[in-house]
Image (cartoon, rainbow, N blue to C red):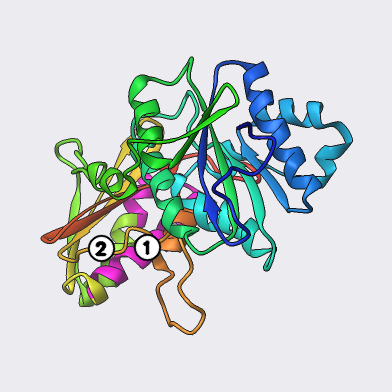
Amino acid sequence: MTTGAAPATATDESFVHPALFYRDDDTYLAGTLPFIDAGLAAGEPVAVAVPRPRLDLLSVELGDRAGKVRMIDMAQAGRNPGRIIPRVLRTFADAHPGSRVRIIGEPIWPGRNQAEYPACVQHEALINDAFRDRAATILCPYDVTRLDEQVLADAHATHPVLIEDAVERPSTAYAPDRTVAAYNQPLPRPPGVPAFAFDGRLLPDVRTFATRLAADLGLVDERLDDLALAVAELTTNSVIHGGGTGTLRIWAEDGQVVCEVYDRGHLTDPLAGRRLPPPTRPGGRGLLLVNHVSDLVRTHTTENGTTTRFYLDRTPPRSGNR
């Protein structure tokens, strides 16, 4: 079966999440253009969220049809993988209630760094829960010539359906929950990092400590405001939900300022920070805000405690990055 029609497992109510393996521009277009055209022919809202070079390629090939498709530069909108579900995929789907939607989403491309990759894999696994009750098809392209074998193996584990050379088959390695757990790993840090232990009485002091040190490390203006917001959300969460105390650490790394908060809480919802809570539920939006302002968020959680680490580029984000 090709991508020119909805996968055989799709119904009006079902969610379908295939991985598309491509080798070059021709196989990329052969897998994506029929998928887009089938959606447009069926009257389904269609979005394409891929890195700019692929976006430009598709725009040229689609011609006038590109105006009927929501085109999103994933390298900007999805720079932080934790933003992709709430601010790219669900935002588009929720803008079309009652309609089945069709999305091409390419969150993993050559050039993603080692710090980003685990969050990307967890994102791909968590899509399956985030869209469990939503009528949608999300096709995820993977470049088999430039991505390494582990990336492709992880794609088998996070997608129930695989497509290559117009042939569709079920993945025998599909195990999204196990994949999320496998990438829930401790986050090493450099030695000698400044730390601040806090409780509820010291929340203003820990925020002052973080912003002053971040300024010394090169954050300015909007980026410094982003750090202040993220620190406020995480340290408040530690006091309310993480045992009442926590430790904040901050340092510079590869052109970014890195900040983490550790507390004794256990994060049991893997989609925390990646989906909106029900409108009737107060709170629950702190991690969403952290994902929104950060260039990357990583989490390691166990029954003994949770570390949430966020990364901010020293330069302001370009338009469309958030």
Task: State the extent of the magenta-drawn residues as a range.
Answer: 211-239
- Residue occupying image coordinates x 19% and y 38%: 188
Q: CA distance from mark 1 to mark 2?
A: 8 Å
Image coords of residue 221 (percent x, y): 53, 51
Q: Disc 1 vs disc 2: Cβ atoms closer than 8 Å?
A: yes
Q: Amino acid at mark 2?
A: Leu
SS under mark 1: loop
- The vertical placement of 245 against 317, above or below, is below
The crowding category of the residue bearing disc 1, from other C-alpha atoms within 10 Å (few below 14, some 14 to 19, many at least 20), is some
Which residue is tagged 2? Answer: 267
Percent position (x, y) of residue 41?
80, 46
Which residue position is annotated with label 1?
272
Residue 25: image location, x then y, percent: 65, 18
Q: Residue, x 74% and y 53% (percent of image)?
A: 44
Which is the main secondary structure of the residues drawn in magenta?
A: helix
Which quadrant of the view contains residue 48?
top right
- Looking at the image, residue 61 sits to the left or right of residue 175; the answer is right
